[in-house]
Amino acid sequence: MAALGVGRTAVRGLLRAPCGLHRALGASAALQQIPRAKSENAKSEGTFQVTMLPGDGVGPELMHAVKEVFKAASVPVVFDEHHLSEVQNMASEEKLDEVVDSMKESKVALIGKIHTPMEYKGELASYDMRLRRKLDLFANVVHVKSLPGYQTRHNNLDLVIIREQTEGEYSALEHESVKGVIECLKIITRAKSQRIAKFAFDYATKKGRSKVTAVHKANIMKLGDGLFLQCCKEVAELYPKIKFDTMIIDNCCMQLVQNPYQFDVLVMPNLYGNIVDNLAAGLVGGAGVVPGESYSAEYAVFEMGARHPFAQAVGRNIANPTAMLLTAANMLRHLNLEFHSNLISDAVKKVIKVGKVRTADMGGYATSMDFTQAVIGSLDV
């Protein structure tokens, strides 16, 4: 530990300091703590303001499904809608600032996938990445849980993937050192590694989970991933009631496919989390059924767990609204609208369990609209 430049006492002092992260996510404080103040203000006006970014691909269609279900369930939410898209020529610094201003007001957002073009046009950081940086959305949380009534290779799964998403390979630091040689920098810092590790252990504590697994490649990237792993070990010492384990990323992927039941909460750097999110989503039905969320010390953004624009489905009325509706239900729980949250999530799960109305990705023939109407019909209002 001394070789890494900090002693155990210093680590304990840092992690116990009353910083913004502790205010936003302590073991005894709900994830909803910061937006709750805004929610109380909104309650006096009868509604909650939420920033909405429909995104690209089928995002606008999925947001329409959310609006229809919210309307039918009389959810007291007003959406402040903004369109930020690089592929639709609706992206600029001005629009990005408008979204950030809206977030400063609402503290909560529901967003679709903002597609990132592969072509390099002089700016390495996409607008999606820049938005996350401006809001400091350091923690992405994807709860991978089997849906009752929908059979997959592994059933009764319940695991959580927590991903650091402000640095790592997504730092947008690339350059051509000499002709034909590109250097891409992966940034791992002690402060952000400790922060995401503490988030993971606080999450496990708050949610009553028993184990955290740090996923890494420290056998090869001895300094970068080595630092991340060391930070996780140091933080784990402060949570003796939570079992701590480590696993190399390639073995983790195999174990997830062979025996995912061994995992509870997994914490990992940026790129690994992006890959594992999608792999794990595939275990329970794919991108169309897994909700997700991202947190900073001040903001909460709700989005699908596996971020895919599904561009080939645009306008065809075939996208599965499940993931976005469950994401929206989680958002309502974050706003302390427990009744409406349960109302919508129970209706979605009821439709899937009955099995008569399923979209193509779940082996059925229903359209997006059919599924949305079935959910509305299942609302116990």
Image (tube, rainbow, N blue to C red):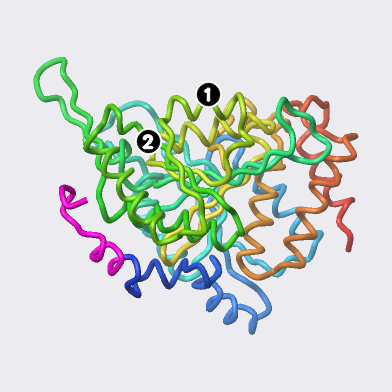
The answer to whether 324 appears left or right of 347 in the picture is: left
Q: Is residue 175 above or below residue 330?
A: above
Report the disc number at residue 134: none
**Residue positioned 39% across, 35% down in the render:** 271
Q: Is residue 315 above or below residue 30?
A: above
Q: Which residue is mark 1?
A: 254
Q: Is residue 5 magenta?
A: yes
**Residue positioned 60% across, 62% down in the render:** 79
Q: Which residues are magenta?
A: 1-14
Amino acid at circle 2: His
**Residue positioned 47% across, 31% down in the render:** 275
Q: Position of residue 17 (x, y in %)?
A: 32, 72
At mark 1, the secondary structure is: helix
Q: Residues within 10 Å of mark 1 (few under 14, many from 20)?
A: few
Q: Residues within 10 Å of mark 2 (few under 14, many from 20)?
A: many
Q: In the image shown, does 68 or 267 lie closer to the viewer?
A: 267
Q: Position of residue 1 (x, y in %)?
A: 22, 50
Task: State which tag comes first along the sequence, 2 or 1.
Answer: 2
Q: In the image shown, does 13 or 129 lie closer to the viewer?
A: 13
Q: Quadrant of the C terminus?
A: bottom right
Q: Which residue is mark 2?
A: 216
Quadrant for residue 40, please give it. bottom right
Q: Position of residue 50 (x, y in %)?
A: 57, 64
The answer to whether 20 appears left or right of 67 in the picture is: left
